């Protein structure tokens, strides 16, 4: 089963994500990998693999990943964010993390969690996450 993995890293975490990705290169090669702008280009150069590069995070890349999540086109989100750095696009990040929770996809915000997700046999097996049922919400009456 090919997993669709989204990778994002803030500037202070890009090197850490690259190191982690090198360690998990074999899994990445079996996956469809999406990434925001600079992170994606760095991954392509460092790992020698194809990455679907979107816009830079502050230029809309976070929202692009969020849209892919809402469309059911992302299975795992790995987002190494820097909690100690003030970020001008903080609302975008909150919206992205909210969508990952709404659509019930696994999210790793640090290396330890990413390691647990990638070490899980569920990543490579035919795991089907429970999809939320929004039928009632979508069919509600607005008065």
Image (spheres, grey):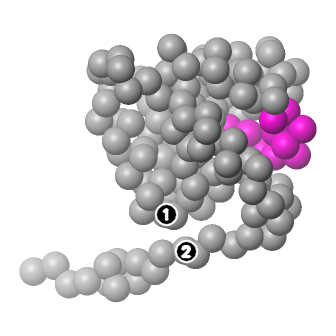
**First-in-chain label (2 vs 1):** 1
Is there any visible trace of residue 41 in the rendered image?
A: no
Magenta range: 24-34
* Residue 11 sits inside the magenta stretch: no
Q: Horizontal placement of 111 versus 22: left or right? A: left
For label 1, the residue is 103
- Compared to 142, does 27 lie above or below? above
Task: Residue 113 in the image: state x and y as whole percent.
Answer: 59, 44
What secondary structure is found at the residue carrying circle 2? loop
Foreground residue among 141 and 79: 79
Q: Nearer the viewer, residue 110 or 74?
A: 110
Residue 103, given in percent of the width and then of the height, sits at: 49, 63
Q: On the rendered structure, is 54 left or right of 92? A: right
Between 11 and 122, the residue placed more toward the observer is 122
Q: Residue at x 38, y 26 (%)?
A: 83
In the rendered view, tell whether residue 64 sits above or below residue 13. below
Residue at the disc numbered 2? 131
Residue 25 - label: none
Q: Farthest left residue?
A: 143
Q: Is residue 50 left or right of residue 63?
A: right
Q: Is residue 127 visible?
A: yes
Q: Quadrant of the C terminus?
A: bottom left
User: Residue shown at 74%/70% (left/top)?
Assistant: 127
Residue 120 % position (x, y): 75, 56
| Mark 2 in CB contact with mark 1 (< 8 angstroms) | yes
What whole-number distance in Å separates the C-alpha atoms at marks 2 and 1?
7 Å
**Quadrant location, the N terminus:** bottom right
Task: Please tell me which residue is depicted at 77% across the width and 50% down the height of the picture.
Answer: 119
């Amino acid at each position: 089963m090919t997993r669709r993995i989204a990778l994002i890293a803030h500037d202070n975490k890009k090197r850490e994500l690259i190191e982690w990705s090198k360690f998990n290169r074999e899994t990445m090669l079996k996956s469809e990998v999406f990434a925001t702008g600079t992170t994606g280009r760095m991954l392509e150069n460092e790992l020698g693999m194809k990455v679907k590069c979107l816009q830079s995070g502050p230029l809309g890349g976070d929202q692009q990943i969020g849209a892919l999540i809402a469309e059911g086109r992302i299975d795992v989100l790995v987002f190494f964010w820097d909690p100690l750095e003030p970020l001008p696009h903080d609302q975008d990040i909150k919206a992205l993390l909210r969508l990952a929770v709404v659509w019930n996809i696994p999210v790793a915000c640090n290396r330890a969690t990413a390691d647990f997700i990638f070490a899980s046999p569920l990543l490579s097996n035919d795991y089907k996450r429970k999809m939320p049922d929004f039928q009632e919400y979508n069919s509600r009456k607005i008065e």
